[in-house]
Image (tube, rainbow, N blue to C red):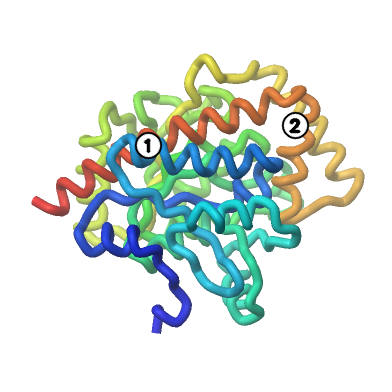
Amino acid sequence: MLEKYLDIKPEVQEAISMGKPIVALESTIISHGMPYPENVKTALNVENIVRENGAIPATIGIIKGKLKVGLTKAEIEYLGQTEGVVKTSRRDIPFILAKGLDGATTVASTMIISALAGIKIFVTGGIGGVHRRAQETFDISADLQELAKTNVAVVCAGAKSILDIGLTLEYLETHGVPVVGYKTEEFPAFYTRKSGYKVDYMVDSPKELAKAIKAKWDLNLKGGLVIGNPIPEEFEMDYGLINRAINDSINEAEKIGIKGKEITPFLLSKIKDITSGQSLKSNIQLVYNNAKLGAKLAVELAKLKNK
């Protein structure tokens, strides 16, 4: 039945069959996260970094109603330039497929499709979470529920700093999702290495992390993990500058009534303008950094499974 919906690239299918290390990559960053041509260039560079570090990249998206696990270069170009690609989370998947539409996958939907294909490691920029002022709006990303129930480990530079990071971590704790810091005791905040909040556990190596991940799923403790990998110091943004930019952007979004899944792309675009493009450069570098760690983690997890 799954074959009807899933289209797995031959290279990725072979890697799955042979137990090789694979890293899933999202496509929202291509269609909604960055302008063209930086989006396509970044996506292809991320794939190259995954390969250089010993794993097979599987960029995930939806093209003309098919769940694509492993996009070709032409398909990445297509998603990077085509208008009207739907930002696709869990609730959207059935309708994108039924209508034969194009979809760019968020953290939640990339996790779902990765799990369907049997891929356990996923690299992204930052996870979604509890939005600021969610006490009034109830605006909470579907990413958090997905992390609670889908067995995929997510390497990220923390939660996007446009969010309420404290409430996001509380939500993850309630749902039993481990929040791990890679060589840090503090949860990173996307553009900055620090957030003021501690992680549950710190790990010093991909091998140690792979052992913990394997133990979790061997014991049938369902759900994913959040692996916070801080942005490299040289690309970190000034904490005060980025927070002022975020607050100004949130206030503008409220004034003009932008809500729901439109809010994150709007805020990221406004922050890029306010910071004169510095935030985009930081965004690209943190994704590259996550790709390195994700590939190394996939290699170590494959070694444990193949013993």
Residue displayed at 27% across by 38% down: 209
Relative vertical location of residue 307 with respect to residue 94 in this rendering, above or below: above
**Which of marks 1 and 2 precedes in the sequence?**
1
Residue displayed at 63% across by 57% down: 78
Q: Secondary structure at mark 2?
A: helix
Q: Is residue 218 left or right of residue 131?
A: left
Q: Quadrant of the N terminus?
A: bottom left
Of 10 and 16, which appears nearest the observer? 10
> Does the image show residue 200?
no
Residue 288 position within the rendered picture, expressed as x and y whole percent measured from the top left: 47, 33
Of 89 and 14, which appears nearest the observer? 14
Relative vertical location of residue 267 with respect to residue 25 in this rendering, above or below: above
Residue 4 position within the rendered picture, expressed as x and y whole percent measured from the top left: 45, 82
Image disc number at residue 213: none
Q: Residue type at mark 1?
A: Val
Relative vertical location of residue 95 with respect to residue 249 in this rendering, above or below: below
Residue at the spot of label 1 = 180
Residue displayed at 70% across by 46% down: 264
Marks 2 and 1 sit apart, C-alpha to C-alpha, by 27 Å
> Badge 1: few (under 14), some or many (20 or more) residues near its Cα, within 10 Å?
many
> Does the image show residue 307?
yes
Relative vertical location of residue 103 with respect to residue 261 in this rendering, above or below: below
